[in-house]
Amino acid sequence: MSVKKTTARVDAPTFGVEEEFFLVDLRSGRSPGRVPKTFVKACQRRLGEAVAFELQQAQVELVSPIFEDAAHALDTVITLRRQIAEIAQAMHLGIIASGSHPIARWQQQAQTDKPRYRRFADEYQIVGLRGFFCGLHVHVGVDDEIDRVQLMNRMLPWLPLFLALSTASPFWSLRRTGMFSYRQSAYTEWPRTGTPDFFADEADYRRFIAILKRAGSIRDGGELWWTIRPSPKHPTLELRIADSCTRAADTIALATLFRCLVSAHLRLPELGAQRSSATRRLIEENRWRAERYGIEAEFIDEARERTVPVAQLVEEALTLVEPDARRLDPHGSLRALRTILARGTSAHAQLQAYDDALAAGLSHRDALRAVVAWLLEATVPGQQLA
């Protein structure tokens, strides 16, 4: 993410997003095994630092500028998506925002030829090769005087809610998985993933990184792939749990919710301060429930010692951040959260497209093509299969 070293105001933290996309061959609907170098060069000429490339060639990342306004962020993300899609279209390619690609096989993917990715392939072997998933990362600026690790600790219980609201990976390798976010399930194959531990503070966190570096496990803090972390490059707290959101409005709604929750935790120092030896395990249990059931999940509330529906937690979150939203979301981007609850996430729409195609008499493979067709149109309107 291209973020300058600035001090974000506590009352109005800045934010940015990183959206990962799959490339799609518009003639077959599949993911292209290899991507023309001309596509990479064209993206870099037109978009510069706004686009980056991932472990697999058939993935591309949109890196936003720093935002202060959610409405401006939505307009910018829509524009950047359209520009990438226009470059891709000229090469018979499209882009889809989804946690997984319904009809791609990881065995057929070619890796991006960079030293870092070659090292990953050698070190992580099949785990690295299978890592063909796309996520949404949200950065929120945190003042230098704030301990980001202590702030992260207090926000951990909210993480499963972001996954539930973003689920977009119900298919994997031409199979219906039975999950709403198979991406999160598969991602746990990697080391140093899932919910981070409760470190005492940033000094304690840096000590842990130093131990791993000396042991040769990692090269830097960027190889801690937890669901949330202090960014190793920027003065931000980075949310990493969400699937890549197909609809741009959902991306900005989740980013705004995270921004408002950061603001609320800075405004209310006691918020999230209580925890027990069971807290992290219960967060992990709720993460599993989000993976499996999405917005239909009921999360375990430790304080109330009972389960609470996701829809109720959304309303509680909106009530909590209302003072922050008045400052940070005057245009009402957070309203899209209730829209997600009403019409479902991308995973719901993908499953509906698949079931409708089967009901119309299409084969399993053609039904999966129908899912890809929906993803293309929902990611950037006007994209379509040949």
Image: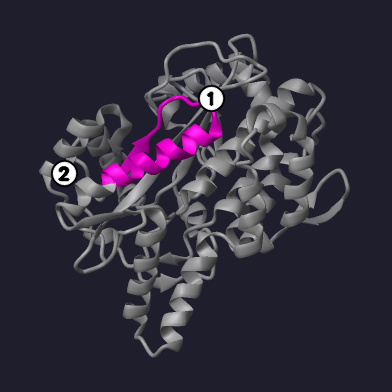
Residue 54 is tagged as: none
Q: Quick one: label 1, few (<14), some, or many (20+) residues within 10 Å?
A: some
Numbered circle sitting on residue 39: 2
Image location of residue 204, percent across then percent down:
61, 17
**In the image, residue 235 above or below residue 95:** above
Q: Please say whether residue 61 is one of the residues in the magenta stretch.
A: yes
Image check: 5 left or right of 335? left
* Residue 68's disc number: 1
Locate the N terminus and report the quarter of the image it occupies. top left
Mark in the foreground, 2 or 1: 1
Q: Say which amino acid is labelled 2.
A: Phe
Question: Residue at coordinates 37% horizontally, 61% vertically from top-left?
Answer: 377
Provide residue 237's location: percent of width, then percent of height.
56, 26
Q: Does residue 19 show up magenta in the picture?
A: no
Which element type, helix, strand or loop, lies under badge 1?
Answer: loop
The crowding category of the residue bearing disc 2, from other C-alpha atoms within 10 Å (few below 14, some 14 to 19, many at least 20), is: some
Q: Is residue 7 above or below residue 127?
A: above
Q: In the rendered structure, which segment of residues is drawn in magenta?
A: 59-84
- The reply to whether residue 309 is in sight is yes
Residue at x-position 53% and y-position 48%: 250
Marks 2,1: beta carbons within 8 A = no
